[in-house]
Image (cartoon, rainbow, N blue to C red):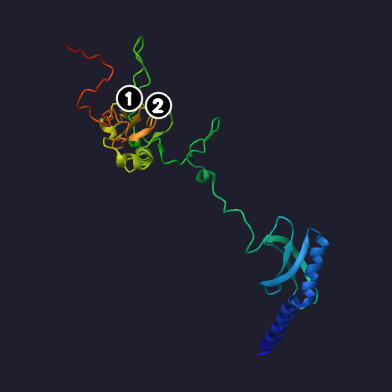
Amino acid sequence: MGNNGLVPRKRSRNRKNAGLLLSPLAISIAREALEELGEGDIGDHKGVTNIGAHVVTHRFAANVPGYNGWEWNVVIACAAGSQWITVSEIALVPGGTALKAPDWVPYHERIQPGDLGPGDYMPARLDDERLTDNPADFALPEPVDTLSVGSQAPAAVDDSGLAKTNTVRRLSTLGLQQAIGRWRDGEFGPQSPFAQRAEYSCASCAFYLPVVAPAKTEVGVCANEFSADGSVVASDYGCGAHSLTPPAEPLGVVESEAFDDEKPIEVEF
């Protein structure tokens, strides 16, 4: 029962400390600390935030050029049973209306297609799922990079002609599938405005150079300088520059010979 008598006194001290930290004196001490810092004008007192039993943060408007919406925070404390207020920390922090930088995004997530410029260096990530060192997951067959002694024949390559020798990692099946998906969903895919209005598809075009690969890719390269020249196109893409596009019909049909009013006329007498 003797301990029960201590509880009210402890709570009384806590309430007394809390009242002291919220008092006009505490606000004045916090403001004086900011004035002593001398880093910018101090505006109105905006409020107080309780941090702990003996610690609070007083907030003041910050009239600092270039920091619209920011505020001064002054952390003050008062030890249990003490009447002394101490300043623990001062900081200029963004308020609710402050213009803040966006959340940090890792570099490999920030980079976008088209960001790579001449001379830029952008190595693939170590965990890039588009690449693999597992032969079972290679999208293309293993290349042949050696020749028999004395052979004068050119080095053999795989059926696709795309495999690279002496590479630690190779294009994975998933990487190939993702690439084909991007190509088919992109500007030169079957759902593009050009393809939707085309009479013929690329598969039957003389300018269509199909990409040969182990899997059925249904993509190729356009060789028409007036269309998607040099770009990967889907076999079911199409445009008005197809090699089978018929010549334009004349606006009118000549059904009779034009009358020449200057042509000499023979007259018999």
**Residue 158 shows which numbered tag?**
1
Report crowding for label 2: few under 14, some 14 to 19, many 20 or more residues within 10 A (C-alpha).
some
Quadrant location of the C terminus in the rendered image: top left
Report crowding for label 1: few under 14, some 14 to 19, many 20 or more residues within 10 A (C-alpha).
some
**Can residue 135 be seen by looking at this rendering?**
no
Q: Residue 255 location, x and y as percent? A: 19, 27
Q: Residue 95 location, x and y as percent? A: 65, 63
Q: Is residue 243 left or right of residue 6?
A: left
Eyeballing the image, is 62 above or below 267?
below
Q: Is residue 124 left or right of residue 56?
A: left
Image quadrant where residue 228 sits = top left
Q: Where does label 2 land, which residue? A: 164
Quadrant location of the N terminus in the rendered image: bottom right
Q: Residue 212 location, x and y as percent? A: 30, 29
Which residue ends up furthest to the left in the rendered image? 269
Element type at mark 1: loop
Eyeballing the image, is 102 above or below 166?
below
Eyeballing the image, is 194 above or below 159?
below
- Tell me which label, 2 or 1, sits earlier in the chain: 1
Q: Is residue 21 left or right of residue 141?
A: right
